[in-house]
Image (spheres, helix red, strand yellow):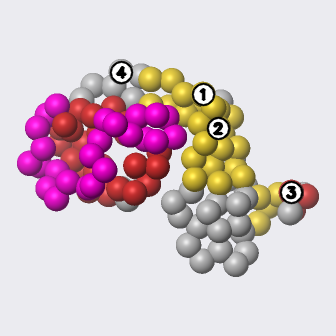
Amino acid sequence: MSSRFLKNVTVGYPLELTVKQFVEKDIEFDRENTIVMLDKIQYEALLVAAAAINQSDRIPAEKPSKWDELSDDQLRQFHHLLMNIDVIDGELVCPETKTVFPIKDGIPNMLKVDAEK
């Protein structure tokens, strides 16, 4: 069986996340690294991911205007979501095609197999 890209998908992002199991790690907080990561993410996608693990109350509903003006305590909440959460079992779903990409043992399978069409 060969794998292919999904046809006729114009955006396909952000993927919807369903979490069946996740683990929390303890990665050391780094203020500057957290700010760099936050500058690169789509905030709406972070909100969706936080909601999928019932932790959306950790961050504000609206994107802060300047990351570097947040306190260390506020940035630690973002750091926790970005670095300390590992999804072990779940799925990602394309918002356009509803194609399901399973997450098993922490690894998402992003291949679409012909037999699954």
Q: Which residues are magenta?
A: 50-73
- In this view, the residue in front, 59 or 111, is 59
Mark 2 or 4: the one toward you: 2
Q: Earlier in the sequence, mark 1 or mark 2?
A: 1
Q: Earlier in the sequence, mark 3 or mark 2?
A: 2
Spatial distance from mark 1 to mark 2, Cα to Cα? 7 Å
Spatial distance from mark 3 to mark 2, Cα to Cα? 18 Å
Q: Which mark is residue 90?
A: 2
Q: Is residue 61 magenta?
A: yes
Disc 4 designates what residue?
A: 26
Q: Which mark is residue 116?
A: 3
The kind of secondary structure element at disc 2 is strand
Disc 1 designates what residue?
A: 21
Name which residue lies at 40% across and 49% down: 46
- In this view, the residue in front, 92 or 28, is 92
Q: Mark 2 is on which residue type?
A: Gly
Q: Are marks 1 and 2 in contact (CB under 8 Å)?
A: yes
